[in-house]
Amino acid sequence: MTETTSTNTATTTTGEPEPSDSMKAFGAAHKAFRKRAGYTQEDYAPLVGYQPGTVASIEQGRRFPPRVFVERAEEVLDAFGALKGVYKHVGREKGLASWFRQWAELEEQAISLYTFENRVGPGLLQTEAYARGLFSVRLPVLADPEIEAMITARLERQSLFAERPNTVFSFILEEHVLRRAAGEGRVMRQQIDHILEATAPRNLGFQVMPMSHGAHACLDGPIRLAESPENEWFAYCEAQRGGRFAVDPKTISVLHMRYAKLRSQALTPEDSRSLLEQMRGAL
């Protein structure tokens, strides 16, 4: 997983992406309707069921507006469908600025998280040594402090497994991802051991798409799907220094269709674990 932004994304001097134009546009529109209705953020927040800080972040374009927030805002502010109209365009540009920060927030709240990877192991399943191997070959070259900060952040995200025992996690990896070394042989042995251990709980599903299968439903690239507590689905599809954050139901429906098909084409969870154990023994 490449936690980076595209070349179209503006960044601050700290490397933190700026809010996207579409998110700032929604925030500005929302703020205008709220002020027209005569509400302060503190007065308004309870009416839509969110904290004042969340309202402020959305209006600043720094937090992705949940669909339920938009629907409640439309009703409370009597926005004539304008907010829903602007919302349709949020997140449509490539390399959505702040995408990873927004995705990390979704991960922390999600009740379902689905991931397909055909490049490298997902960040949630990486060991420190595996992650270090990936960051060490990143171009442009990263400074040592940057690498350490990225590794720390990546490992901290893995606390989700302990903190979200009722979240359904599903991972599907291409077999060649597991066979591509990211360091010495011991690094991959540790990585496979880690995957076997991390995906043992009942709420974690892990499958391998074998190379012997040939063509399959997700050849277009990686897929990430997240379901919010309000049962709203979000998606992110990433490519070289760019990607797309999706909220459009039609787009997400297509990705769901592909992911469901991929599940049927991949090895079963039991056979996937057996393959991992065989690969581990051969290292």
Image (cartoon, rainbow, N blue to C red):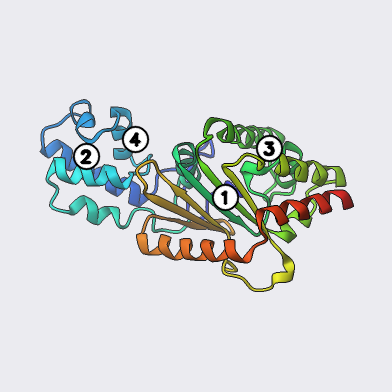
Q: Return the residue found at the far bottom.
A: 215
In the image, residue 244 above or below residue 107: below
Query: Is 69 displayed left or right of 143 in the figure?
Result: left
Q: Residue 246: x percent and y percent?
A: 41, 56
N-terminal label among 4 and 2:
2
Q: Residue 34: x percent and y percent?
A: 17, 38
Q: Return the residue found at the far right.
A: 282
Q: CA distance from mark 2 to mark 1?
A: 38 Å
Q: Which mark is residue 31?
A: 2
Q: Residue 231: x percent and y percent?
A: 37, 47
Q: Which residue in the protein does label 3 denote?
A: 147
Badge 1 crowding class, 10 Å Cα cut-off, few under 14, some 14 to 19, many 20 or more, is some
Comparing 177 with 230, the one in front is: 230
Q: Could you tell me the amino acid type at mark 3?
A: Ile
In the image, residue 122 above or below residue 14: below
Q: Which residue in the protein does label 1 denote?
A: 170
Q: Could you tell me the amino acid type at mark 1?
A: Ser
Residue 283 seen in this snapshot = no
Q: Which residue in the protein does label 4 denote?
A: 57
Q: CA distance from mark 3 to mark 2?
A: 38 Å
| Residue depicted at x 39% and y 58% | 92
- The kind of secondary structure element at disc 4 is helix
In the image, residue 57 above or below residue 185: above
| Residue depicted at x 50% and y 44% | 100
Q: Residue 176: x percent and y percent?
A: 74, 60
In the image, residue 222 above or below residue 29: below
Q: Are marks 4 and 2 in contact (CB under 8 Å)?
A: no
| Residue depicted at x 35% and y 50% | 21
N-terminal label among 1 and 3:
3
